[in-house]
Amino acid sequence: MTFQCYSHADNTREYIMTSDAPRINSYDFMAVILCAGFVYFLFFMVTEETILVIRDVGIQVKTVYLGGRSVSRFIDRSKIQDIIINEAITMMHIRVYMAIIVEGQDKMVVVFQNLLPRLNVLLQAYHGARSIIFHEKDHSDFPLEFS
């Protein structure tokens, strides 16, 4: 530690206490920002989203991240009120999404919320899920895979 005193005028003095710890230069700062960005990318970048629909049991919603971490949520069939396709309108975009309305919850469970597939993909998942959960006729006459 160093202490310095400067007298600028008769009525002005400046006292400075300086630490001996090394300072971070701009290259060190950029390296820290890049590492933080990499960690964010690794742990929060979604690579896969799935819904597993099982008749008379329920729906499992699963999200897999780039780093290998996965988060799953199960919704019991008795709690599922409806499965819907909805639109979210913002200032710049109109997003179509699929959601599950769960009894006793204020918020819907949005499926594929990170990857946001197109409407034709959502329609296939929507009709397939409704046919299994609500024993409806499957109206999807779409191909099995999309790119």
Image (cartoon, grey):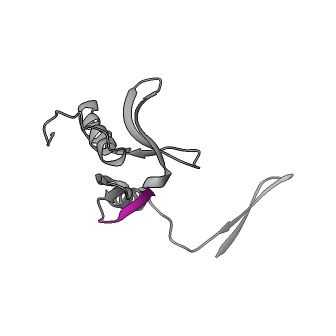
User: Which residue: 35% across, 57% down?
Assistant: 62
Q: Is residue 18 left or right of residue 68?
A: right
Magenta stretch prevailing secondary structure: strand
Q: Is residue 64 left or right of residue 29?
A: left
Q: Is residue 123 left or right of residue 110?
A: left
- Give how far across and how far down residue 87 sits, in percent: 42, 28
Q: In which quarter of the view is residue 121 placed?
A: top left
- Give how far across and how far down residue 45 sits, in percent: 33, 53
User: Which residue: 42% across, 59% down?
Assistant: 73
User: Which residue: 50% across, 71% down?
Assistant: 22
Nearest the viewer among 116 and 40 is 116
Q: Quadrant of the C terminus?
A: top left
Q: In which quarter of the view is residue 129 placed?
A: top left
Q: Which residues are magenta?
A: 68-76
Assess whether residue 79 is covered by the magenta stretch. Answer: no
Assess whether residue 69 is covered by the magenta stretch. Answer: yes
Image vertical order of residue 100 relative to residue 73, above or below = above
- Give how far across and how far down residue 71 sits, in percent: 39, 62
